[in-house]
């Protein structure tokens, strides 16, 4: 490689380096898959939004931010209850710096974004404690495959991220249904990871569905239907449709491990051309274990953008270094793509993030 990029190799270093070599200098397309689930409104589970009902607005606002540089569904930018800005700010800044095109795909949201997007015909998800959380999973997977196949022709590779509040809990649900040991391993937007609450919610969902740990090992469609979310079929289908033509970088944290597990059960060969791109905050997080989940069922490499907000002049950004938020809206993968395409450094990226943060906060 011509120049050392600000990218860390968190899992399967040899394959991770090879993947980075394959995408370096190439032109990606960034896809943001948005969805909502009532699971995200369970008190204490998610920090995505100032109050639980606000989570319906977070994904559309994130999508608007990526395309317009500002939000229309809400004023200012999506923030946590502590006033920390959405990781979509990182994504927007990285994509802008490297001039990477964006497409928004709706897996199933309650509030539609005020921008152009592709709709896969999915609905917003129900609370997984019902044991019946997602409609028409198979149809959405099939439609997403067709879309993925076409989009792979339009770029050298795809970077696919997500915005769905409550997604690490639904990830635990699907991983558990598929027989992957993930209790205590999924991450959280919150500084104190509510592992016991997540496990309790998942157990209630599996019980309501008449299932137990590993009972849906060979039925990933039903696993999503019972205890998943609408982002999963959209994202899994996009990957399966695209990978035979182009590499795919899954841009996200431990939620992406559930998507990997679903793909592994549906079409394991599809994982040969996939890597996960996340942030240093996820891979260094003591309260979660992304590589510990992945290595149970596949050897997909995990890369991490070596972001560092410690030098920032803004407390709202510096607080990322304390373990709040960590990832989302494809922040890590978008950063890696910007570094690989245009040689963007983490210092340049931080300056751009600060500039955008200042101008967005002035709109509040």
Image (cartoon, rainbow, N blue to C red):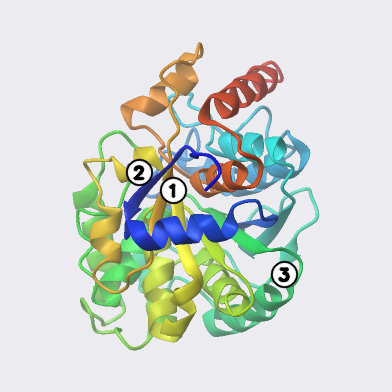
User: Which sits earlier in the primary sequence, circle 3 or circle 2?
Assistant: 3
Depth check, front residue: 81 or 272: 272
Residue at the disc numbered 2 = 282
State if disc 2 and disc 3 touch (CB < 8 Å). no
Residue 39 in view: no
Spatial separation of the CA atoms under disc 2 and disc 1: 7 Å
The tag on residue 278 is: 1
**Residue at the (60%, 35%) spot, across then down:** 344
Left or right relative to 177: residue 353: right
Residue at the disc numbered 3 = 151
- Crowding at mark 3 (Cα within 10 Å: few <14, some 14-19, many 20+): many
Residue extending farthest right: 116
Q: Position of residue 335 (x, y in %)?
A: 55, 42
Name which quarter of the figure residue 261 lies in.
bottom left
Viewport quadrant of the C terminus: top right
Spatial separation of the CA atoms under disc 1 and disc 3: 22 Å
**Residue at the (78%, 48%) spot, across then down:** 114
Residue extending farthest top: 313
Total marks drawn?
A: 3
User: Which sits earlier in the primary sequence, circle 1 or circle 3?
Assistant: 3
State if disc 1 and disc 2 touch (CB < 8 Å). yes
Residue extending farthest front: 2
Left or right relative to 20: residue 207: left
Spatial separation of the CA atoms under disc 3 and disc 2: 28 Å
Name which quarter of the figure residue 124 lies in.
bottom right
């Amino acid at each position: 490689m011509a120049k050392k990029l600000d990218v860390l190799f968190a899992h399967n270093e040899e394959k991770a380096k090879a993947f980075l070599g394959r995408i370096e200098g190439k032109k990606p397309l960034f896809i943001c898959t948005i969805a909502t689930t009532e699971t995200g409104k369970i008190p204490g589970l998610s920090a995505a939004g100032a109050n639980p009902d606000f989570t319906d607005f977070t994904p559309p606002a994130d999508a608007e931010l990526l395309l317009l540089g500002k939000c229309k569904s809400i004023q200012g930018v999506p923030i946590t209850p502590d006033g920390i800005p959405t990781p979509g700010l990182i994504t927007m800044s990285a994509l802008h710096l490297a001039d990477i095109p964006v497409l928004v795909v709706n897996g199933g949201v309650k509030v539609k974004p005020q921008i152009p997007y592709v709709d896969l015909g999915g609905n917003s998800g129900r609370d997984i404690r019902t044991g019946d959380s997602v409609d028409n999973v198979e149809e959405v997977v099939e439609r997403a495959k067709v879309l993925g196949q076409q989009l792979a022709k339009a770029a050298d590779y795809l970077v696919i991220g997500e915005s769905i509040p409550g997604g690490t809990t639904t990830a635990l649900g699907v991983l558990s249904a598929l027989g992957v040991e993930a209790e205590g391993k999924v991450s959280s937007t919150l500084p104190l990871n509510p592992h016991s609450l997540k496990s309790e919610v998942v157990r209630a969902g599996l019980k309501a569905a008449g299932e137990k740990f590993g009972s849906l090992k060979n039925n990933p469609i039903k696993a999503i239907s019972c205890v998943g979310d609408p982002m999963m079929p959209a994202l899994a289908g996009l990957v399966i449709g695209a990978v035979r033509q182009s590499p795919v970088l899954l841009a996200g944290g431990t939620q992406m491990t559930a998507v990997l597990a679903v793909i592994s059960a549906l079409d394991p060969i599809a994982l040969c051309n996939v890597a996960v791109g996340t942030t240093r905050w996820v891979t260094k997080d003591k309260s979660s274990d992304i590589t510990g989940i992945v290595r149970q069922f596949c050897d997909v490499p995990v890369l991490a953008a070596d972001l560092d907000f410690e030098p920032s002049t803004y407390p709202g950004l510096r607080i990322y270094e304390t373990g709040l938020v960590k990832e989302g809206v494809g922040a890590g993968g978008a950063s890696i793509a910007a570094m690989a395409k245009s040689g963007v450094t983490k210092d340049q990226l931080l300056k751009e993030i600060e500039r955008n943060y200042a101008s967005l906060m002035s709109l509040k």
